Image (spheres, rainbow, N blue to C red):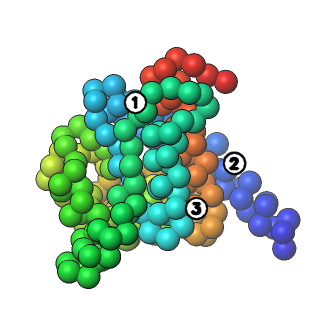
Amino acid sequence: MIGARIAAHLDTLTRIGQDDALKAVIGRAVDEITDCFRKGGRVYFCGNGGSAADAQHLAAEFSGRFYFDRPVLPADALHGNTSYLTAVANDYGYEQVFARLISGLGQPGDILVGLSTSGNSANILRAFEVCREKGVRTIGLTGADGGRMKELSDLLVNVPSTDTPRIQEAHITIGHIICELVEQAIFGEGR
């Protein structure tokens, strides 16, 4: 059982590594996030459940540090304030929690990264719709078919899997690659 799960994980990462088109999209995400930060923009993240944890993790890699000490890169996860989250979910509905916040915080040139294994999370879809209205770029991290986020994402990084744990594992790997390459591009240091 354990070996089979490790093999499935490795198979997903191998398929990503062999997919030149997918690697090119990841490279474009690096370029867009780098450009956003260089121009004084902010990068926001959102997700639900395990994807919320991954969103918060990746935001912290930018706003804290990744491989080396350097200035802050302004990034935050939209679900970090539980008082806001529960109030808006109660008063407006859970599908509005990210949309309402990005409508107030997001500026043209900013980026919202949405993590959803299915690509069908209603609250992320609604936030991406608001981003279109505001000129905020969107990067979707999803599973194999991209779900409804495929149509709303400016860039779609769709992991070639339909297995939620394997998708989430790949999202954090891809996210770490993006964080590392953005950090290197802006600050010129590397491993």
Q: Position of residue 29 (x, y in %)?
A: 42, 39
The residue carrying pointer 1 sits among few (fewer than 14), some (14 to 19) or many (20 or more) residues within 10 Å by Cα, namely many
Please name whichever residue, 89 or 135, is drawn nearer the observer in this view of the structure: 89
Q: Which residue lies furthest to the top in this view?
A: 188
Question: Which residue is at a point 53% across and 46% down the rendered structure image?
Answer: 175
Identify the residue position indicated by label 3 in the image: 167
Identify the residue position indicated by label 2 in the image: 14
Question: Which residue is at a point 27% across and 45% down the rendered structure image?
Answer: 137
Which part of the image, by quadrant, shows the N terminus? bottom right
- Quick one: SS at disc 3? helix
Question: Which residue is at a point 71% across and 59% down the rendered structure image?
Answer: 9
Real-space Cα separation, disc 1 to disc 3, in angstroms: 24 Å
Q: Which residue lies furthest to the bottom in this view?
A: 90
Question: Which residue is at a point 61% across and 22% down the rendered structure image?
Answer: 190
Q: For the residues labelled 2 and 1, say whether their Cβ atoms are less than 8 Å apart.
A: no
Identify the residue position indicated by label 1 in the image: 34
Can residue 97 be seen in this snapshot? Answer: yes
> Horizontally, is 86 left or right of 176 in the view?
left
| For discs 1 and 3, the disc positioned in front in the rendered view | 1
| For discs 2 and 3, the disc positioned in front in the rendered view | 3
Residue 150 against residue 165 in the figure, above or below: above
